Image (cartoon, rainbow, N blue to C red):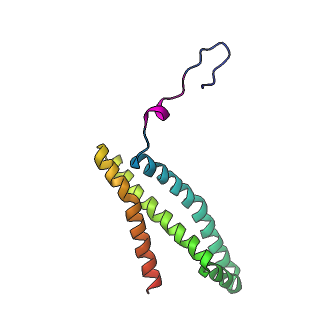
Amino acid sequence: MAHNAPGRKARPLSPHLQIWRWGPAMFISIMHRATGNALAVGGIVLLLVWLGALAAGPDVYALFQLIAGSPVGLVVLFGISLVYFWHLVSGIRHFILDIGAGFEVKGNNFWSALVPVFAILLTAAFWAAILLR
């Protein structure tokens, strides 16, 4: 129901929610915004904590390393890296759409479905490189 001034006829809300069906492209587009926000908030907080620990001296930095190397810390770091790679791959998809390619529904859905696959593969390769060095 729309909000109108008194005495005005009620107009319906925008029909986009009634006519669009959920699909891979819509999900990936929403996740692109969500991962961008997660990186902006969580990534910057993590970066600032790391820099603060580094600036505070060896004892505080050793505590940071202990926490970051704990199982919970590794889960957080893994999550941040997965969010980063998801946003990166999704951003490349959005760039291709911005240049005018890939708007056909079948192709758009195909490339949208590949975003999480590539994000997971890149995250796995990143962590394999770190853990197997």
Please say if 19 is above or below 53: above
* Residue 121: x %, y % from top left: 39, 69
Q: Find out whether residue 17 is within the magenta segment.
A: yes
Please say if 51 is above or below 7: below
* Residue 58: x %, y % from top left: 67, 86
Q: Residue at x 47, y 33 (%)?
A: 16
Q: Find out whether residue 14 is within the magenta segment.
A: yes
**Extreme top residue here?**
7
Please say if 81 is above or below 66: above
Please say if 114 is above or below 25: below
Q: Which residues are magenta?
A: 12-20
Left-right relation of 118 to 55:
left
Q: Residue at x 42, y 67 (%)?
A: 120
Residue 62 in sight: yes
For the C terminus, the image quarter is bottom left
* Residue 49: x %, y % from top left: 65, 71
Q: Residue at x 66, y 82 (%)?
A: 61
For the N terminus, the image quarter is top right
Place residue 40 in its image quadrant. bottom right
Q: Nearer the viewer, residue 52 or 108?
A: 108
* Residue 81: x %, y % from top left: 50, 69
Residue 100 in sight: no
Numbered-mark total? 0
